[in-house]
Amino acid sequence: MLKSLKTIAVGLVAACISVSAMAENERALDLDALLKQLEEGKFAQSQQNKQREQEFMAQRAEQDRILRETGKLRDRTLANSEQLETQFEENEFKLADLNEALTTRLGSLKELFGALQQVAGDTKNKFYNSVISAEIPGRAQFLDQLAQDMGSSSKLASIDEIERVWYEIQREMTQSGKVTKFTTDVVEAGGAKVTKEVVRVGPFALVADGKYLDFNGVTGTVAELIRQPPARYGDSAAELQASNGELVKFGIDPTGGSILGLLVQAPNLKERVEQGGVVGYIILIVGAFGLLLAIERLFTLTIIRTKVNSQLKSKEIKTNNPLGRVLKVREEHPNADTEALELHLTEAILAEVPKLGRNLGIIKIISVVAPLMGLLGTVTGMINTFQAITLFGTGDPKLMAGGISTALVTTVLGLVVAIPTTLLYAMLNTRSKNIVYILQEQAAGVIAERAEKG
């Protein structure tokens, strides 16, 4: 058994030795392969380096060729630049000589052409703004082109152009004294373009269908004013268009449209009232109420005074008037003594006084309150104005003027209501007192008559 164990151990050792030997052989084979691969890689790297070197040399030769060509191009360009500079200097001297020769040959004509250019420029601006250009277009464009041509020394004005400048100025003067009719396209306030017969009053105004027109010299269009002047001017414009050479009163604007533009910008009565705001409307409502009361009292007192006068002339007592009702007391108390009758008459008169003075107190209150309400609106408007100044500053005077104007509208409305209501109250109060005085006078006569009889 011991021998068998030894035999097994010897076999195991031999197997281990054989396995170790095989591993050593495979390792040796791997190192050789690796070395061979390194040699092959080194060769391939060497081939790539040579190829890159050849490509670099080829590109370097190409870059050298491009550099040489660029240098030659630079030299040619420098030479050409020097040649052009020399030619430019020569041209400058030639141009100076030619300008001097032109100035010498022009002589006094140069001053003439300068004056002609100035006149053409000034006249062009006048023609652009003249309403005569609506009937005779194209004049401003000719003068504008002539002024531009005269501004350059390369072109001089011809005899025909000089004569046309004189002719256009003379035609402007001639047309300024005429009232003519012509047909042209008019842009209405709604935006529609309609062909209309237009009447031109010298250089002052254009009218059509009783409306004033505005001429835009830049665009060459004729348009209705969005806001027309008051009706009396429109009526005169309609009469002018309908007239056949007859004299018609017509308002003209000698400033060429400036006054007319300010006139149409002025607010009308409705816009003035709207500027008063809520306070203004309240003042007008209160004033209308007071006016209605005053009209009712005036009508009533007039009828009563007529009936009282009729009663004064009649011996028959009628109870449809205050005097008849007061005199009726005498018949109702035929046996009363003087003092009792006086008391009854005083009672009858006192009963008539409230009827005669009804609503007069309200009218008086309205006449007092209206200006106070106007002052309230003014103070409120001034507060708003100063708030606007705080926010936007005082750089725009129109802002302050507009706010102050709006604030003062309520004061105007208050005074407009207060003045007539005060006059109406004084008149109505006087009429009422006159009737009361008649009643007192007749009552005193009745008492005197009764006293004489007693």
Image: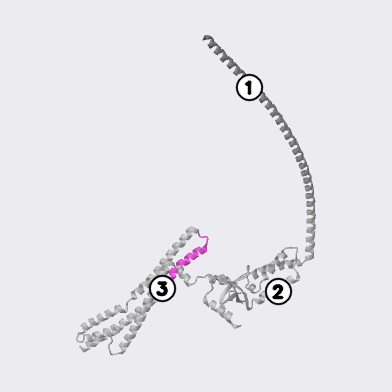
* Residue 152 visible in the shown view: yes
* Residue 443 visible in the shown view: no
Mark closest to the chain's N terminus, 2 or 1? 1
The reply to whether the magenta stretch includes residue 418 is yes
Q: Tell me the kind of residue under disc 2.
A: Tyr
Q: Residue drawn at (33%, 82%), measured in percent from left and top?
A: 434
User: Alpha-carbon neighbours of circle 1 within 10 Å: few (<14), some, or many (≥20)?
Assistant: few
Question: Disc 2 vs disc 1: Cβ atoms closer than 8 Å?
Answer: no
Question: Disc 3 vs disc 2: Cβ atoms closer than 8 Å?
Answer: no
Residue that badge 2 annotates: 167
Q: Position of residue 362 (x, y in %)?
A: 34, 73
Residue that badge 1 annotates: 26
In what element is the residue under mark 2?
A: helix
In front of the other: label 2 or label 1? 1
Looking at the picture, tell me which residue is in the foreground, 30 or 208: 30
Distance between mark 1 and mark 3 Cα atoms: 130 Å
> Magenta part of the protein: which range?
393-419
In what element is the residue under mark 1?
A: helix
Distance between mark 3 and mark 2 Cα atoms: 61 Å
Q: Tell me the kind of residue under disc 3.
A: Val
User: Alpha-carbon neighbours of circle 2 within 10 Å: few (<14), some, or many (≥20)?
Assistant: few
Position of 453 compared to 299: left or right? Answer: left
In front of the other: label 3 or label 2? 2
Q: Position of residue 285 (x, y in %)?
A: 40, 71
Position of 230 compared to 321: left or right? Answer: right
Q: Quadrant of residue 221?
A: bottom right
In front of the other: label 1 or label 3? 1
Question: Disc 1 vs disc 3: Cβ atoms closer than 8 Å?
Answer: no
Vertical position of residue 296 compared to residue 400: above or below: below
Position of 190 compared to 58: left or right? Answer: left
Mark closest to the chain's N terminus, 1 or 3? 1
The majority secondary structure of the magenta stretch comes to: helix
